[in-house]
Image: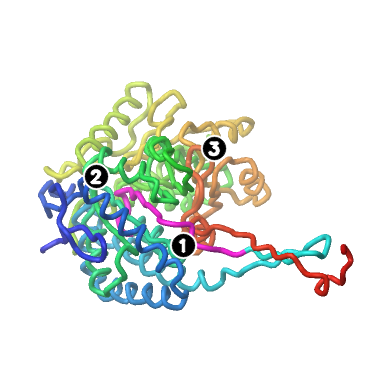
Amino acid sequence: MDFPTRMYIDGALTGGSGRKDVLNPATEQIIATVHTAGLEDVERALQSAKSAFPAWSSTAISERQNWMHKLRDEVVAHEEFLRDCVHHELGKPWAQTHEDWDRLVASLEFYAEEIARVQDVGLADRAGTHTHRMVHEPAGVALAYLAWNFPLLNLAFKIGPAMAAGCPIIIRPSEQTPVSAYAVGMLCEKIGLPKGVVQILCTDGYDVADALTASTIPQVITLIGSTGTGQHIMRTGATSIKRYSMELGGNAPVLVFADADLDLAADIVCGVKFSNAGQICVSPNRIFVAEAVHEAFAEKVVARARAARVGFDKEADITTGPVVDRRAWIRIKGLIDDAVSQGAELLAGGDRPAQLNSGHFLAPTVLDRVTDTMPVYRQETFGPIVSLVPFSSEGDLLERANDCDEGGLTAYVFTRDLAKAEACAAALRYGEIQINGVKYDIDLPHGGIGQSGIGHDCSALALHDYLIVKRITRALDKTEFGGLNA
C-alpha cells in the first residue's frame, strides 16, 4: 500500500527539508518515508495561516460549514484508507481504528452545527445610558500539537472547532504517526480548501517545532501530550501572550468498593487498559480494590488478561496491539520488573507473548499488591498494566486517590451505593469522574485539572477555546434614554 508522504502547506501537498522513516511497531518495518519540515517550511506555513486569517475569519458561517461538510464527505468516502493509515503507523488493532475515523467524522459534523448556536449576548446597563453586546470572534491562528496514540482522533479534536470558529490551524502530528494526518492533508487539497485554512506538517524533534511555538503569529496553542511537553511549550511560547488548551498526562485511580459489580468493573478496567495497548490518557492506572473483594476481583482481571488476544492481523479480533516503539517497551517492562523487585506479585503477563517473536508487543499484565512507593504507581504507565492496590479502610482512600503528581484527568468509581459514589465524585480532584461505566463522545467535555491541562477537547467548551469575546458598547443619545442624565 502506498501511504501519504507529503506535507500540506498553503493549500498544496509539498515536500519538505527533511525525510523520516515511519515504522509499524507491530512489524518493525518501514511503511513510508515522509517529508518533514525545516525552518523555511515552518515559516511558510506560519505566513500562509496569517494571510488566511482575515478572509477565513470573516467567511460566513454557512460557507465554513459547507467546507467542513465537503471534508467530512471525503473522510467518509475514504474510511478504509484512513483506517489503514492508523492500522499500519501505530499497529493499532483494526477494529480499534474505527474510533479514530469516527471521531473525525463526528467532529466535522458536530462543530459545523455547534458554531451556529453561538449567539451574541446583550447586557443590561444599570444607568440606562448605554447598550452593550458581547460578541464572539475567531481568536486567531491556531497551532495544534498531536500525540501519537490516537492519530486521527487527536486531529479530529482540533480541526473541527478551529475550522468552525474561523481560525486557520497549523497541525503538527507526532513524528511517530504522521501518515494519517498527511492523508487528511490529501483530502483538504482534493476539495480545494482555501489556502492556509489548514496546514499539516511534521517536524523531526523539538528544534524546528519550537520555531512554531516561539512565533508570535499563533494566538492559540493546543496540545495533546505529556505534562512535561505542555510545560515546554508554554515556556517556549512565552515570546507573546497566547491562549492555551492542553490535554496532558493522567494517572487515573479506580475505586472498586466491596459492593461493586465486579464483572462490570473488570470489563471496564481491562477494556480500557488493554485496548490500544493501554496507551490512553484516561486509562485506569491505580486500581484501589476493597480487601473484601480483592481476591475475587483479581481473578476476574487475570482471566481477562489471559484471554486477551495480542497481535497484528486485520482479519482477526485483536484485543491488544504493540506499544509504540522499542523505547516504550523497555520503559514499561522496567516498571513491571521494578515493581516485582519491590514486592508486587506478577499475576499475568509481564513480558513479550511467547508466540510473537518480533514487534513491540507486551502481554496484558496484572500486578498485585502495588504500593505507593513504586514508580508503576506514581507514573502514568501508558502500557497494558493493571496495578491492583488493595485497601482495608476507606478513611484515607480519597486522599490516596488524589495523591497524584501527574495531575487529574479521569477517575473511576464502582459501587452500588449512589450516595457514596456522589461523595467520591465531589472529593476526587479530577476533570472527569466515571461512575459504574465509561463514556466519551464528541459532545461531552474532555479535560483535566491541575497538571493534567487547561481547556477542553470535545463539546461546545472546545469551540470556545478558539473564540474571543468582544464587548461592544454604544452610548445612547438623549432621545434614546429620555435625557435622564442630561
For label 2, the crowd category at 10 Å Cα-Cα, with few meaning under 14, some 14 to 19 and many 20 or more, is many
Magenta stretch: includes residue 49:
no
Using the image, tell me which numbered label, if any, was put on residue 324. Answer: 2
Mark 3 to mark 2 CA distance (whole Å) = 33 Å
Residue 101: x %, y % from top left: 32, 65
Residue 188: x %, y % from top left: 27, 68
SS class of the residue under badge 2? loop
Q: Looking at the image, is mark 3 or mark 2 nearer the viewer?
A: 2
Using the image, tell me which numbered label, if any, was put on residue 290. Answer: 3
Q: Earlier in the sequence, mark 2 or mark 1?
A: 2
Q: Locate residue 325 relative to residue 238 in the image: left or right.
A: left
Q: Locate residue 393 relative to residue 459 in the image: left or right.
A: right
Residue 128: x %, y % from top left: 82, 65
**Whether residue 63 is situated above or below residue 426 in the rendered picture:** below
Mark 2 to mark 1 CA distance (whole Å) = 25 Å
Residue 233: x %, y % from top left: 39, 39
What's drawn in magenta, residue-wise? 135-152
**Whether residue 228 is situated above or below residue 276 in the rendered picture:** above
Q: Earlier in the sequence, mark 3 or mark 2?
A: 3
Magenta stretch: includes residue 145:
yes
Q: Earlier in the sequence, mark 3 or mark 1?
A: 3
Q: Which residue is mark 1?
A: 441
Identify the residue at image location x=46%, y=52%: 263
Name which residue type carries label 3.
Answer: Ala
Assign the C terminus to one quadrant of the image.
Answer: bottom right
Q: Locate residue 164 relative to residue 123 in the image: left or right.
A: left
For label 1, the crowd category at 10 Å Cα-Cα, with few meaning under 14, some 14 to 19 and many 20 or more, is few
